[in-house]
Amino acid sequence: MLFIISSIAVTIFIFSNSLQDAAESTQQSSVFVDAVVAIAKYLGIVVKRPMAVFVVRKCAHILEFAAQSFFVTLCFDM
């Protein structure tokens, strides 16, 4: 039952993020983008902000769908 609830919760989270407009979504991900740029700068790596935005947003999508796949798989594995 816990895995079913987790699957539904992750799916709702994905849909709620999909319903955000571009400005709101960009603002939300800017916290992570700033952290990635700061860490890269600290390590001496030059990262252009548009590329960091692209990478962070794609990684977020991958993580969201990986979490959903994980919980759905556990539902069928019960």
Image (tube, rainbow, N blue to C red):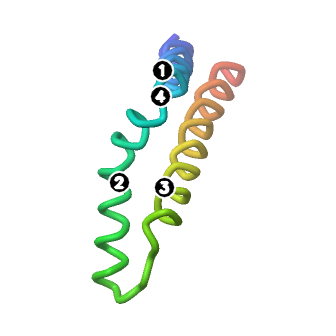
Identify whether 17 is placed above or below 5: below
Q: Earlier in the sequence, mark 2 or mark 1?
A: 1
Q: Residue at x 28, y 82 (%)?
A: 42
Q: Which residue is mark 1?
A: 16
Residue 63, given in percent of the width and then of the height, sits at 54, 44
* Crowd band around label 2 with a 10 angstrom C-alpha radius: few (<14), some (14–19), many (20+): some
Q: Position of residue 2 (x, y in %)?
A: 48, 16
Q: Is residue 6 visible?
A: no
| CA distance separating discs 2 and 3 | 7 Å
- Dot label at residue 56: 3
How much space separates mark 2 and mark 1, taking CA atoms?
19 Å
Q: Quadrant of residue 65?
A: top right
Residue at 29%, 71% (x, y): give it: 38
**Mark nearer the N terminus (1 vs 3):** 1
What residue is disc 4 on? 21
Per the model, the C-alpha gap separating discs 3 and 4 is 17 Å
Separation of marks 1 and 4 at Cα, in angstroms: 11 Å
Q: Residues within 10 Å of mark 1 (few under 14, many from 20)?
A: few
* Amino acid, disc 1: Ser
Q: Are marks 2 and 1 in contact (CB under 8 Å)?
A: no
